[in-house]
Image: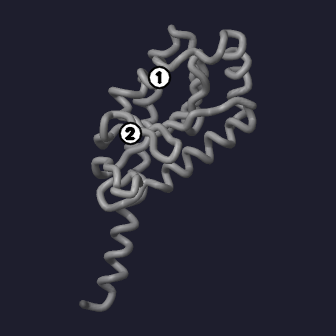
């Protein structure tokens, strides 16, 4: 093999496995916000900073919009992959962020990764404690259709604390 080929190959692999360009990510964040607006009439509050914090009758959800270059698949050992690349770092970050927000709010927070650019097996799966959903088809039903766990006063209290959770 020619000198430098392995170095170039490793840099290309790292670049292709990394996050998409900022404009694509911004579009996905905006699309997620538009989808979550549909929850307002059902008593949900949505706060957007880096991710979307959704507080409503079904609980507290931290929704991060993500783009992946290839369809998602489950590995034979249970890991989640996009093409040849594991997405374990994305899931770990979602869990970490939800845990940090839960610490501030004093309430359980469900981490969600809303995928806009790649198919999700079954439209919704839970991997390593994180909901991974097809954003356009499964995000709103996931949040809206769960059993009611919070009353209106608790939703208002938690929504009031939400901006300080970041």
Question: Viewed as shown, does residue 100 lie left or right of 43?
Answer: right
Label 2, residues with CA under 10 Å away: few <14, some 14-19, many ≥20: many
Percent position of residue 129, x then y? 53, 43
At x 44% / y 30%, what residue is drawn?
Answer: 32
82 over 161 or under it: above or below: below
In this view, the residue in front, 2 or 39, is 39
At x 68% / y 37%, what residue is drawn?
Answer: 101
Percent position of residue 78, x then y? 40, 53
Percent position of residue 128, x then y? 50, 47
- Kindly state the secondary structure of the residue where label 1 is placed: helix
Percent position of residue 142, x then y? 44, 25
Instruction: Identify residue for label 1.
Output: 36
Question: Viewed as shown, does residue 134 lie left or right of 130?
Answer: left
- Kindly state the secondary structure of the residue where label 2 is placed: strand
Compute the Cα span from label 2 to label 1. 14 Å
- The mark nearer the N terminus, 2 or 1, is 1
Label 1, residues with CA under 10 Å away: few <14, some 14-19, many ≥20: many
Give the quarter of the image for residue 5: bottom left
At x 52% / y 10%, what residue is drawn?
Answer: 42
Question: Viewed as shown, does residue 37 lie left or right of 3?
Answer: right
Q: How many labels does the image show?
A: 2
The image's mark for residue 115 is: 2
At x 73% / y 26%, what residue is drawn?
Answer: 161
Q: Quadrant of the C terminus?
A: top right
Question: Viewed as shown, does residue 4 lie left or right of 144?
Answer: left
Res. 148 in view: yes
């Amino acid at each position: 093999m020619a000198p430098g080929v392995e170095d170039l190959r490793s840099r290309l692999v790292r670049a292709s496995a990394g996050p998409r360009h900022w404009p694509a990510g911004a579009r996905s964040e905006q699309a997620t916000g538009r989808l979550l607006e549909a929850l307002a009439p059902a008593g949900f509050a949505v706060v957007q900073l880096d991710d979307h914090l959704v507080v409503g009758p079904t609980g507290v959800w931290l929704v991060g919009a993500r783009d992946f270059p290839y369809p998602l698949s489950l590995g034979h050992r249970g890991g989640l992959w996009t093409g040849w690349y594991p997405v374990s770092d994305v899931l770990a970050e979602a869990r970490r962020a939800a845990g940090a927000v839960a610490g501030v709010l004093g309430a359980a927070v469900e981490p969600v990764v809303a995928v806009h650019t790649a198919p999700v097996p079954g439209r919704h799966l839970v991997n390593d404690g994180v909901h991974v959903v097809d954003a356009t088809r499964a995000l709103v039903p996931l949040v809206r259709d769960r059993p009611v766990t919070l009353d209106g006063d608790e939703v208002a209290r938690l929504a009031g604390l939400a901006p300080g959770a970041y």
